[in-house]
């Protein structure tokens, strides 16, 4: 069973340098894979939730071909909103979304940021599709989730 980051941090507080390899072996299921951590993580979550990747891309309003390349880490984006769209469409919780963002190398949701705070609530409540999410973001005076190709 995979351990969360806090559990691993507590273990590491009491780990001696001579025990590092033992730590890796004992916690192998909790460690990020070296080659494609985002791809592995997202595929597993999408599979666990019983959703088809195609449906995720459709709901996220992302071109299917582009979405597959992002999930496979064949293409990269600097647009955090694209990853957030995918996470929302894949029905990820805020915690799972943070895991995806970390693995993609992007900032996690931050409760002190107004827009991120709204997104955390939206990820918890699931009020509707991406259009509804953007409507709520706009109503609250923050930027909507940008779509593919749209940059600041």
Image: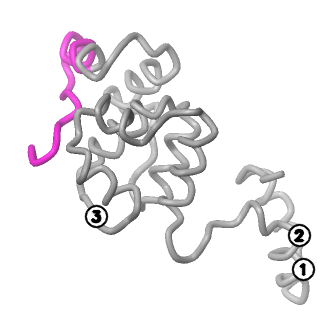
Report the quarter where the C terminus lies. Answer: top left
Residue 135 sits inside the magenta stretch: yes
Question: Circle 1 is placed at which residue position?
Answer: 22
Q: Provide residue 102's location: percent of width, then percent of height.
A: 49, 55
- At mark 2, the secondary structure is helix
Q: What is the basis of the colouring in this image?
A: one colour
Callouts 2 and 1 close, C-beta under 8 Å: yes
- At mark 1, the secondary structure is helix
Q: Provide residue 97's location: percent of width, then percent of height.
A: 50, 40
Distance, label 3 to label 2, CA atoms, is 32 Å
Mark 3, residues whose alpha carbon is within 10 Å: few (<14), some, or many (≥20)?
few
User: What residue is drawn where x is 82% and y is 66%?
Assistant: 27
User: What residue is drawn where x is 48% and y is 60%?
Assistant: 39
Q: Which residues are magenta?
A: 134-152
Q: Main secondary structure of the magenta part?
A: loop
Question: Circle 3 is placed at which residue position?
Answer: 76
User: What residue is drawn where x is 63% and y is 39%?
Assistant: 48
32 with respect to 152 (left or right): right
């Amino acid at each position: 069973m995979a351990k969360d980051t806090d559990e691993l941090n507590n273990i590491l507080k009491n780990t001696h340098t001579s025990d590092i390899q033992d730590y890796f072996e004992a916690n192998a299921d909790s460690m990020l894979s070296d080659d494609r951590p985002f791809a592995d993580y997202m595929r597993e979550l999408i599979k666990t939730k019983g959703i088809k990747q195609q449906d995720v891309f459709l709901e996220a309003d992302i071109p299917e071909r582009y979405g597959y390349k992002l999930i496979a880490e064949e293409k990269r984006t600097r647009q955090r909103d694209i990853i957030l769209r995918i996470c929302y469409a894949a029905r990820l919780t805020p915690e799972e979304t943070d895991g995806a963002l970390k693995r993609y190398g992007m900032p996690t949701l931050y409760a002190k940021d107004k827009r991120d705070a709204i997104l955390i609530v939206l990820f918890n409540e699931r009020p509707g599709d991406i259009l509804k999410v953007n409507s709520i973001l706009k109503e609250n005076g923050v930027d909507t989730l940008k779509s593919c190709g749209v940059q600041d």
